[in-house]
Amino acid sequence: MGINLPSGNLVPKGKRRESNEEKKDYSLSKRIDVGRIDLSLDRSVLTISMPKKPAAIKPEKVVPIKAN
């Protein structure tokens, strides 16, 4: 099992016991910090964490409520 990141696409590679190699392509947003992508495998479930780049995270905006 592995992950390739050619030209901004996420390409998971792996083999299932009962079938041939599977291949799917996923386009990544330019806001994703590719260097911080994290993978974990637990009980045959692959979890992919893709944090945004710091510049892509917008600060929280507080909107005051006006009383009449």
Image (cartoon, rainbow, N blue to C red):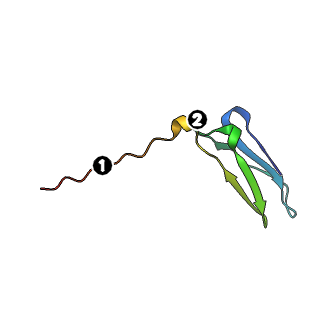
| Residue 43 image-quadrant placement | bottom right
Q: CA distance from mark 1 to mark 2?
A: 29 Å
Instruction: Give the structural element (helix, strand or loop) at label 2.
Output: loop
Query: Image point 34% across, 48% down: which residue?
Result: 62
Question: Circle 1: is it few (<14), some (14-19), or many (20+) Cα within 10 Å?
Answer: few
Picture coordinates of residue 20 (x, y %)?
A: 85, 55
Q: Earlier in the sequence, mark 1 or mark 2?
A: 2
Instruction: Give the structural element (helix, strand or loop) at label 1.
Output: loop
Mark 1 highlights which residue? 63
Report the side of 46 relative to 16 (left or right): left
Mark 2 highlights which residue? 30
Q: Nearer the viewer, residue 53 or 13?
A: 53
Query: Image point 61% across, 45% down: which residue?
Result: 51
Picture coordinates of residue 47 (x, y %)?
A: 70, 57
Query: Image point 24% across, 53% down: which residue?
Result: 65
Query: Image point 62% across, 40% down: which residue?
Result: 28
